[in-house]
Image (cartoon, rainbow, N blue to C red):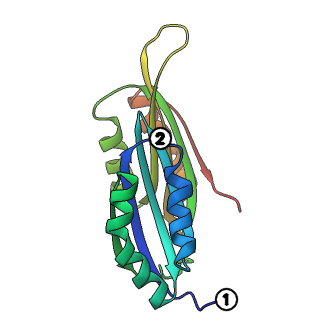
Amino acid sequence: MPEINHQLLLWATGPWKDTHLPELLSALSDRGCVSHDMRVSQLQDGFAAHMVVAGNWSSIGKLETALPGLAEKLGLQIGASRIAARPAEPELRPFAVELSAPQQADLLPALVQFFAHHGVSVAEVVSQPYQAHMTQAPMVNMQLVVLVGASAQPPALRESFMDFCDDYHADGIFDPIKN
């Protein structure tokens, strides 16, 4: 197997088609690349993909050259940027955050600001609206992955998060991610 030491952050958006993901992955494989990390979503009738693609310098170069033609063939907007591997950060601990609340325009910005204020990095966010079954009230469900420093006090942070949830009439969970 060729040496895999170069990485590309690749993103693709456009109208949803079931064939987009298989064709993207085939294009990677055909050029000697692999996807190390991937997020693919159907957002309404749209397709959104973000992935870290790895390969040797030649494979990554071939893929970069092929992207405009692939975008045209698939009817997608595709972009890419060379990236370096993320250095290990053993002093950071990942936590899963879940929150269900009534829809509020300021909720997500306030939640992100809450973690920033506490020196916590937000690594991932998924936000999905829904309607409450009984009342049809507009609600939102959010899942986050946050990175907490080893010197932080998780019980105090959890208590502050629960106070935040009370302020926004939300149900929340703040737990360490166990591998």
Quadrant including the N terminus:
bottom right
* Nearer-the-camera pick, 105 or 44: 44
| Residue type, label 2 | Gln
Q: Can residue 63 be spotted in the picture?
A: yes
Q: CA distance from mark 1 to mark 2?
A: 33 Å
User: Residue 33: x, y in percent?
Assistant: 54, 77
**Residue at 31% across, 67% down:** 68
Reply above or below: 133 against 74. above
Q: Nearer the viewer, mark 1 or mark 2?
A: 1
User: Residue 58: x, y in percent?
Assistant: 46, 89
Nearest to N terminus: mark 1 or mark 2: 1
Reply above or below: 50 against 98. below
Q: Which mark is residue 42?
A: 2
For label 1, the residue is: 1
Decide if residue 36 is on the left or right side of residue 68. right
Q: Secondary structure at mark 1?
A: loop
Reply above or below: 48 against 32. above
**Residue at 30% across, 43% down:** 109
